[in-house]
Amino acid sequence: MEDKAIKRKTTNKESRRQQSVVYTLTSLSGERKVVCKKIFLNTLSISERTARTALSKVKECGILEADKRGGRQRKYDEKKREEFIRKDISEHIDRFPRVESHYCRASIIKMYLHPDLNLRKMHAMYLDELEKVGRVEKPSFHTYRRVFKAKNLSFHSPKKDQCSLCVSYREGDDTVKHKLKARYDLHIAEKVNVRSLK
């Protein structure tokens, strides 16, 4: 089906139509045959509106323009690039050591990162790493945060997880740490044993 300029006029009346549609079908031998509109539409089982819409989308060079239905069309390369970035961010986050919940191990699957860390610091470290290896593309903080949130991580332990011995040892001066060292080491060893039995 193609638009062709009108070659001759059959009446003296002025017509607004500037072009005429020629319908063709290709035979099994590859020969194109001109057919009437009704045969063309019935053979392809399409409506006149579908045929006209398709014709309106053909560019001057004869190529059909891309279908714009379904929202923004995303190229395969772009999807692959985004997958690579998310995977790279995920691997960066996974390199940070994690601590499981102290008392709630059985009921909570959330893991905790060191309380001195935060998302801004981690994102800045990630960008520094990219710069060192010469990667030009710098993923946004928003993208980094989205990947982080999917991992069910947090930066601080819940208050009920802070046992008095751990807090005293961690926050005490050298004298306090020296006094508590034996009890603290035993406490940590018991925690490790409980974890290994699970």
Image (cartoon, helix red, strand yellow):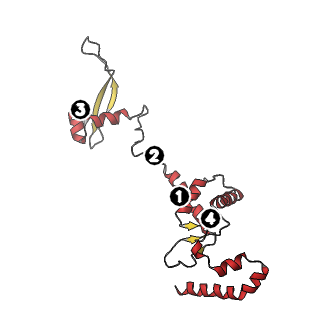
Mark positioned earlier in the residue sequence (2 or 4): 2
Q: Alpha-carbon distance for marks 1 and 4?
A: 14 Å
Mark positioned earlier in the residue sequence (2 or 3): 3
Q: Which residue is mark 1?
A: 83
Image coords of residue 3 (percent x, y): 34, 28
Image coords of residue 50 (percent x, y): 29, 37
Q: Is residue 176 left or right of residue 101?
A: right
Q: Is residue 148 left or right of residue 25?
A: right
Choose mark 3 or mark 4, whichever is in front. Answer: 4
Q: Amino acid at mark 1?
A: Glu
Choose mark 1 or mark 4, whichever is in front. Answer: 4
Q: Is residue 21 left or right of residue 71?
A: left
State if disc 4 and disc 1 touch (CB < 8 Å). no
Q: Amino acid at mark 4?
A: His
Q: Which residue is mark 3?
A: 37
State if disc 2 and disc 1 touch (CB < 8 Å). no
Q: Which residue is mark 4?
A: 92
Q: Which residue is mark 2?
A: 73
Whether residue 85 is visible, yes or no, is: no
Q: Secondary structure at mark 2?
A: loop
* Residue displayed at 28% across by 35% down: 49
Q: Amino acid at mark 2?
A: Gln
Q: Alpha-carbon distance for marks 2 and 4?
A: 30 Å
Quadrant location, the N terminus:
top left
- Position of residue 36 relative to residue 108, above or below, is above
